Amino acid sequence: MAELLQYVITGITVGLVYSLIALGFVLVWKSTGVANLALGQIVLLSSWITYTMLVRAGLPLWLGFVVVIIFGVFLGWVVERLILRPLIAQPILSLITVTLGLAYFIQGIVVFFWPISVAALPRLFPIEPVRIGPAVVSQQYLWAAIISLALFALLSLFFRYSRMGIAMRATADDQRAVQACGIPVTRIFSRSWMFACVLAAVGGVLMSSIGGVTYGLVETGLKSFSVVILGGLDSFLGAIIGGPIIGLAENLGDGYLSRLIAWQGIKEIIPFVIIIIVMFIRPYGLFGEERIERI
Amino acid sequence: MDLPAGTRNYSYADDMTIFRTRTQKLMLVGLFIMLLAIPLWMNRTWLGLVNLMGITIIAATGLNILTGYCGQLSIGHAGFIAVGAYTSAVLTSRLEMPFLVGLLGGGVLAGLVGVIFGIPSLRVKGFYLAISTIAAFFIIIWVITHWDSVTGGFMGMSVPLASIGPIVFKSEESQFFLIMGITVLCIFFAKNLARTRVGRAFVAIRDNDLAAEVMGINLFRYKLTAFFIGCFMAGIAGSLRAHYTGFLSYEFFTLTDSILFIGIIIIGGLGTTLGPILGVVFIKLLDHLLTHWLVPLIEGKHILPAGFASGITPMVFGLAIILFLILEPRGIAHRWQLFKASYRLWPFSY
């Protein structure tokens, strides 16, 4: 029982971080129609930047985070301005492959500047475990979940009340109408990329504070694809709910399935198996808009 | 544009012929003679590079049929290559079958696995398909690393040399003839496929699948055919790779390789026969240039931290993919066409 509770709590808390990264994806997809396949690499890059700021440069925690957030904003701006904007109105194939090229490029940058490939961040959260009922949970997971939830709340307030947020939702709905209203659509594109990169950066910091900075972070980004596929590509709610589901499936599968059928490391592919299953049964996801067109 | 002055097409058959003029035929013969003469003058390093190019061209041609002609994006190509490689290795080393059985078995099994993971393509496209092929890649690699008794798991496995009857392909030169022979066959097949009913159906599906279906093209059949052919070629390439290296490890097949294959066909030119060849030659030469020339040059000067070298190639390749998409989305093949046309018309530009 204690074991089950432990798996559930770990799964949900890690899943919330996946949700955070996935939100960045959904944001870009909805407002610009670009599928950002470089998400995992962006997570990795911003974790390394955090490492450099906190360990190499020795900045205090708060200043380091400010720098990382600024870096996220800058990265989003650069990517949108230099790579995606020349490709507006190109076929979807180009838009997907250009992010693949970006992924490749960022991977190269990471290997180039940080050849050590594994590093630990300084302790961000207290590590004393907390008891919840019979389960013992590491505090880092809880903090990650709390920060994710706080960001969800902030984002939903932003999209509900801020002028920019409303404009972004409108762009997601109908680009042409928004342009006719005098809202600069390209600026919205740029903002969406900034948001996505900042969310990826925060997700990266949270994940690497738990597991250290490794190439595994790329797979964290890839797992957030399974979150968006499960939740529905164009649904914020889907991304938020999909994350904990993937996290739960992963941890419960790791806990029970690997013991049941002696498959070690099944945890790694559970999200991908879920992707394939969703593709076969319900390709538009749990909350995605169901398109009638048969393609 | 494509025809020399004074030659005109008077029938559709003329339009579809591969060799329209005698010059083209002669040049092809010349090309073959040059190809056959390669082992005579190239040293071993370069011959090895050419062999790897041949294998990569086969895989890229398969991906080009799937993505370039049929429009189904696959980012799991390295996974399908791995299926072919391991199938062939298991057939020849554990079951002691002849090499040709391994080669074809690898191709067919890779094709079938491709068909299974291609089934979602009937309902989804674009990004969804990209993600499901990424998922396919991870699942394939996971199965390979965890099915110890057959694939050797993380340890990898050794593979016997390729042999047909009494001929054993041991030296680099003999490998060259084997690989080049199969590469030429594959290119010839791809070139011909493009002008058959199947090839035209692929192009129709790529350009507008709804319209294609209305015109009576069975999407189910043709999309899966595209997956089968594309992954079959990947399997053939994998099998050749396994017997060429003599050793197999799951580390040979990475997600970045899959991305690079997409990059290759984009840099070369999507939906052309020439594209994959040019793309592979471009990427492999660039790779060779970077690792054998640029890296030693910089390393000697001690400006950059040690270990930076493995980062340079992905950076340059990623940049190449991005720049080609922005500046020349139709790839080198298109540039080559333009060059041929302007060469033919020179000094008059029309």
Image: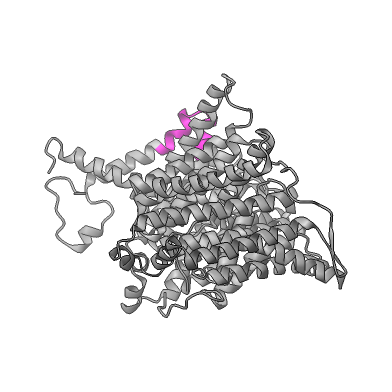
Q: Main secondary structure of the magenta part?
A: helix
> Residue at point 78% right, 64% down?
A263
As rendered, which of B108 and A111 lies closer to the eye? A111
Counting from the top left corner in percent of width and height, residue A82 is at: 40, 45
Give the color scheme: rainbow, by chain, secondary structure or one colour: one colour
Magenta stretch: residue B39 in it? yes
As rendered, which of A283 and A264 lies closer to the eye? A283
The quarter of the picture where residue A67 lies is: top right
As rendered, which of A226 and B279 lies closer to the eye? A226
Magenta stretch: residue B146 in it? no
Counting from the top left corner in percent of width and height, residue B290 is at: 50, 31
Counting from the top left corner in percent of width and height, residue A242 is at: 61, 70
Q: Is residue B275 left or right of residue B6?
A: right
Q: Is residue A141 left or right of residue B231?
A: right
Q: Is residue B147 left or right of residue B272?
A: right
Counting from the top left corner in percent of width and height, residue B318 is at: 48, 43
Toward the top, the furthest residue is B301
Which contiguous range is marked in magenta?
Answer: B35-51
The quarter of the picture where residue B109 lies is: bottom right
